Image (cartoon, rainbow, N blue to C red):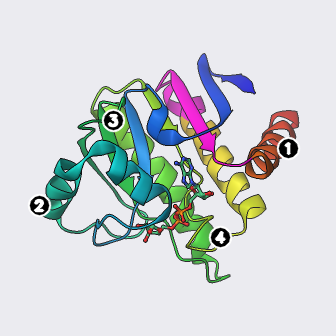
Amino acid sequence: MEAKVNGCILRLVKGDITKRKVDVIVNAANRQLLPGGGVCGAIHRAAGPELAKECAEIGFCDTGEAVITKGYSLPAKFVIHTVGPVYSGSEEDPKLLSSCYGNSLKLAVKNRLDSIAFPSISTGIFGYPIEKASKVALSTIIDFLEKSGKPSLVEMVLFSKTDFDVYKNTLEDLLKD
Ligand code: AR6
């Protein structure tokens, strides 16, 4: 599914983010920037051991912030590592999750990267309910595109059909407003 926002494409894809041929993919990282499980483990496996070395040199990324590395053996040229909140039910959760998307988009534009793919940050090991997370993710991306008119392609890559359907329903609702 695809929507046009301020001349940019916002696309929902069901699949594996490590296979996306975009300028930059986003990693749902941890604050120590260590190769973990989930999508983070998959990205590190596909990129090769040099990714963990560059992450170790950076050393730390706070929740809601984002850092950039090269993509090594990935089809994507770069990886932006952002750390989502561990879901707690507090009012900080959506603010921090929104910062992950906003700061990653800012960093992509700053580095002149014009296509970016996100996973569904925080909705695996970090326990963020996916319906709530999909509203934060998509509304933050739409706001950013409306304000900046770039990057020209933003993908949300969902790993399961169920996750894809949640994002699809949320996007359809947001586009009605
Ligand atoms: N492509 C796209 N999405 C994927 C892939 C993939 N290859 N693999 C998993 N997902 P998670 P979090 C989905 O747990 O909740 C790590 O250990 C998955 O189905 O990867 O932010 C980090 O190092 C889910 O919907 O990230 C951190 O310690 C989504 O990606 C912690 O887990 C995010 O799930 C981060 O937890």
Q: How far apart are the two marked residues, 2 and 1, measured between alpha carbons?
A: 40 Å
Residue 9, image x, y percentages: 61, 22
Q: Amino acid at mark 4?
A: Tyr
- Mark 2 or mark 4, which is nearer the start of the sequence? 2
In the rendered image, is residue 28 in sight? Answer: no
Residue 165, image x, y percentages: 82, 45
Q: Secondary structure at mark 2?
A: helix
| Label 3 crowd (10 A; few <14 / some 14-19 / many >=20) | many
Does the Cβ of the disc 1 residue fall within 8 Å of ligand 1?
A: no
- Mark 4 or mark 1, which is nearer the start of the sequence? 4
- Residue of label 3: 74
Name the foreground residue: 150 vs 16.
Answer: 16
Residue mark closest to the camera, 1 vs 3? 3
Label of residue 57 in the image:
2
In the rendered image, is residue 43 in sight? Answer: yes
Q: Secondary structure at mark 3?
A: loop
Q: Amino acid at mark 3?
A: Leu
- Residue of label 4: 128
Q: Are marks 3 and 2 in contact (CB under 8 Å)?
A: no
Q: How far apart are the two marked residues, 3 and 2, measured between alpha carbons?
A: 20 Å
Identify which residue is drawn at 50% across, 50% down. 101
Say which quarter of the image contains residue 82: bottom left
Q: How far apart are the two marked residues, 1 and 4, measured between alpha carbons?
A: 18 Å
Q: Are marks 2 and 1 in contact (CB under 8 Å)?
A: no
- Mark 1 or mark 2, which is nearer the start of the sequence? 2
| Label 4 crowd (10 A; few <14 / some 14-19 / many >=20) | many
- Residue of label 1: 169
